[in-house]
Image: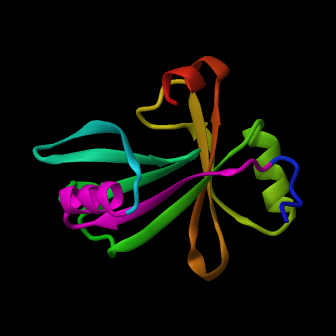
């Protein structure tokens, strides 16, 4: 049960992979996810890959991309949408969440703001807020 009125639905889960193309093939062929978008990372053969399952995005983060090179394989983070990121962060902090990164513009995503917080067992969680016009461009 979501007791925080400021926190929206889960919108994204992210996984660190070694074989991004193999992961894309598996999730599309076996699980029925759809390719939503590829964003060039600047590393040849290693895009940021987003798959879609209903309203949920699955992000595949290749360890071939420098900033992900030393991350462990598997689950990386889960993200929530929110209508008011400042209120959501304040609410989460008041409920005992450790805010890792306060609301700020999301890198590479015009019209988005993000914040990061820590869940139990050190699980990495994110909040995303988007301007209504940005929502149309990034669906």
Nearest to the observer: residue 139 or residue 87: 139
At 57% from the left edge and 73% from the top edge, which residue is drawn? 123
User: Picture coordinates of residue 7 (x, y %)?
Assistant: 78, 50
At 86% from the left edge and 56% from the top edge, which residue is drawn? 4
The residue sitting at the left extreme is 44
State left or right for residue 57 relative to residue 84: left
User: Picture coordinates of residue 97 (x, y %)?
Assistant: 75, 66
Q: Which quadrant is the N terminus positioned in? A: bottom right
Q: Magenta segment range? A: 7-30
Nearest to the observer: residue 104 or residue 13: 13
Specify the quadrant of the image occupied by residue 43: top left
User: Picture coordinates of residue 15 (x, y %)?
Assistant: 39, 64
- 31 up-or-down from 70: above or below: above
Q: How many marks?
A: 0
- 101 up-or-down from 75: above or below: above
State left or right for residue 54 relative to residue 82: left
At 66% from the left edge and 21% from the top edge, which residue is drawn? 132
At 79% from the left edge and 58% from the top edge, which residue is drawn? 92
The residue sitting at the bottom extreme is 121
Asked which colour scheme the image uses, the reply is rainbow
State left or right for residue 21 relative to residue 135: left
User: Picture coordinates of residue 105 (x, y %)?
Assistant: 55, 34
Specify the quadrant of the image occupied by residue 128: top right
Q: Is residue 107 magenta?
A: no
């Amino acid at each position: 049960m979501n007791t925080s009125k400021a926190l929206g639905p889960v919108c994204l889960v992210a996984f660190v992979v070694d074989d991004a193309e193999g992961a894309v093939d598996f999730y599309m062929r076996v699980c029925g996810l759809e390719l939503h978008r590829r964003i060039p990372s600047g590393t040849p053969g290693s895009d940021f890959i987003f798959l879609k399952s209903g309203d949920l995005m699955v992000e595949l983060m290749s360890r071939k991309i420098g900033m992900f090179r030393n991350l462990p394989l598997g689950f990386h983070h889960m993200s929530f949408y929110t209508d008011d990121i400042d209120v959501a962060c304040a609410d989460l902090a008041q409920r005992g969440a450790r805010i890792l990164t306060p609301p700020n513009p999301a890198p590479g995503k015009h019209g988005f703001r993000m914040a990061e917080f820590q869940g139990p067992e050190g699980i990495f969680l994110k909040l995303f807020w988007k301007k209504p016009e940005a929502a149309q461009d990034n669906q």
